[in-house]
Image: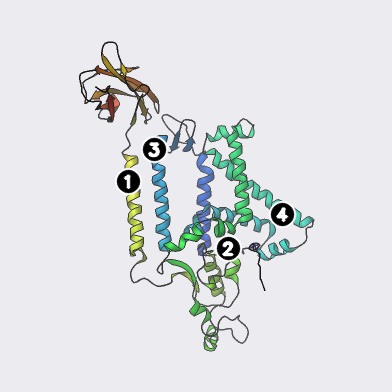
């Protein structure tokens, strides 16, 4: 007989119960910090000699990112690559030591889902009330409660999307322009997209994002080992020889339970009820676990109520390491790579030159034969002042005997954060060199405020081939 099954399994709604405890308090603190930074940072003023008076602003039109006192230009995009490498290494390093704590405490999906669930509890009540409401028929009360919940979700989602847009313009002006219909179309489109995605991900999809959409849930196992700290249930203590048992009048004290062989787990189910992904931590390590540790708080509150020792569920390793988890070879390698990448990035930022020089040779035509017998090559020098001051530089040519002119001048004055192109025409007699290609160097030297600054860029002079 052929047995067929539907590959699609409907989602079972999860109604997490609220809990108080150490790890829940830590999560609240991180949530408040993250929300404070995200929503308030675009409004933080910042005094600059030149540029917008906003602490963080990503100016796409002028291709500049302002991060407090640091101005990042489009040419500095490799810094972004460095940040991504550091972020990846930090994720690997933390995962190797403490498992999936990033997901449980710092991930945007977790932070926003926490707020959406808080709104749900505020409007609809605790877990049992929400279950009853979800299972009940649609009536005026259910429609009103669901409508208020969704409206508050949409409000949070809209503020989330709009706050993101404020990073890309001057917040006060963009705020007014947005609500008067004068903002550019991308501002409205981005806000709409982020509002919809936040509403769906944090309000409707929730744990499905962590379980099915996020690749981290699948490849985290390659960063785990038996010494990695994970949220785990103490099976030996919780089950003993006779398994779990709910307290009753005959078996109430812990000593009585131990004599019979019952474990410390009273099978209250609180650890399952608070889990945001709906798993039972007592079944062992599961890829759905985001290491939020709420089950630890739940279990400890029950252990305290029945006067049992705490930490039946706790952060622990499958196999205790003989030496510190920090000194495991894998974690030391991650840590060393993270340290090197961070040092290189900081060094690159700290040693950035105040001016950037780019040289582009005009290749149509590659060279020009002049009527006086000279060969002329054309170059475009691109100078970019990366300071907030007006500065001057001189342009020179070294490594080749040649006549040359610069337009507009060989001394260039640049305003703060100004870029300017300089046309340079280099010529020499046709027979002065038998080489088809000659190498030379453009040298840009600072004067006055920029004395001691010297930037070089190699270039090539092309002669006609001699037959």
Q: Residues within 10 Å of mark 3 (few under 14, many from 20)?
A: some
Label annotation for residue 277: 2
Residues under labels 4 and 2: Cα distance?
22 Å
Name the residue beneath numbered marker 3: 76
- Disc on the earlier residue, 3 or 1: 3
Q: Position of residue 203 (x, y in %)?
A: 63, 54
The quadrant the N terminus occupies is bottom right
- Disc on the earlier residue, 4 or 2: 4
Vertical arrangement, residue 326 with respect to residue 239, above or below = above
Vertical arrangement, residue 117 with respect to residue 241, above or below = above
Q: Residues within 10 Å of mark 4 (few under 14, many from 20)?
A: some
Name the residue beneath numbered marker 4: 146
**Comparing marks 3 and 4, which lies closer to the viewer?**
3
Residues under labels 1 and 2: Cα distance?
39 Å
Tell whether 19 sits left or right of 332: right
Residues under labels 4 and 1: Cα distance?
52 Å
Name the residue beneath numbered marker 1: 344
Q: Residue furthest right?
A: 139
Camera-side residue: 255 or 436?
436
The quadrant the C terminus occupies is top left
């Amino acid at each position: 007989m052929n047995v067929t099954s539907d590959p699609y399994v409907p989602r079972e709604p999860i109604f997490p119960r609220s809990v108080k405890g150490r790890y829940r308090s830590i999560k609240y603190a991180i949530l408040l910090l993250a929300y404070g930074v995200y929503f308030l940072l675009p409004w933080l003023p910042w005094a600059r000699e030149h540029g917008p008076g906003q602490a963080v602003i990503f100016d796409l039109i002028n291709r500049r990112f302002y991060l407090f006192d640091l101005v990042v230009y489009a040419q500095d995009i490799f810094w972004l690559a460095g940040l991504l490498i550091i972020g990846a290494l930090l994720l690997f390093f933390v995962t190797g030591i403490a498992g999936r704590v990033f997901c449980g405490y710092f991930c945007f999906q977790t932070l926003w889902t926490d707020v959406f669930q808080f709104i749900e509890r505020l409007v609809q009540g605790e877990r049992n009330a929400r279950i009853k409401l979800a299972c009940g028929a649609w009536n005026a009360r259910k429609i009103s409660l669901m409508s208020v919940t969704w409206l508050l979700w949409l409000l949070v989602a809209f503020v989330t999307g709009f706050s993101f847009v404020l990073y890309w313009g001057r917040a006060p002006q963009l705020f007014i322009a947005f609500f008067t219909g004068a903002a550019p179309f991308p501002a409205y489109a981005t806000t709409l997209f982020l509002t919809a995605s936040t509403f769906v991900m944090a309000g409707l999809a929730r744990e499905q994002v962590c379980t099915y959409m996020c690749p981290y849930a699948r490849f985290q196992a390659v960063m785990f080992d038996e010494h990695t700290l994970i949220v785990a249930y103490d099976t030996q203590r919780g089950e003993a020889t006779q398994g779990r048992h709910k307290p009753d009048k005959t078996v109430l004290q812990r000593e009585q339970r131990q004599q019979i062989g019952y474990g410390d787990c009273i099978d209250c189910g609180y650890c399952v009820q608070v889990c945001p992904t709906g798993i039972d931590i007592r079944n062992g390590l599961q890829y759905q676990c985001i290491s939020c540790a709420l089950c630890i708080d739940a279990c400890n509150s029950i252990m305290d109520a029945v006067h049992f020792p705490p930490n039946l569920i706790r952060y622990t390793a499958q196999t205790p390491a003989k030496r510190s988890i920090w000194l495991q070879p894998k974690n030391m390698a991650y840590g060393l790579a993270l340290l090197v990448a961070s040092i290189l990035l900081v060094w690159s930022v700290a040693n950035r030159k105040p001016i950037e020089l780019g040289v582009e040779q005009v290749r149509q035509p590659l060279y020009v034969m002049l009527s006086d017998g000279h060969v002329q090559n054309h170059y475009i020098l691109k100078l970019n002042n990366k300071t907030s001051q007006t500065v001057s530089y001189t342009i020179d040519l070294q490594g080749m005997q040649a006549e040359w002119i610069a337009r507009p001048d060989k001394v260039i004055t640049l305003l703060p954060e100004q870029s300017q192109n300089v046309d340079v025409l280099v010529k020499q007699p046709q027979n002065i060199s038998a080489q088809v290609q000659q190498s030379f160097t453009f040298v840009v030297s600072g004067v006055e405020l920029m004395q001691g600054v010297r930037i070089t860029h190699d270039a090539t002079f092309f002669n006609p081939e001699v037959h």
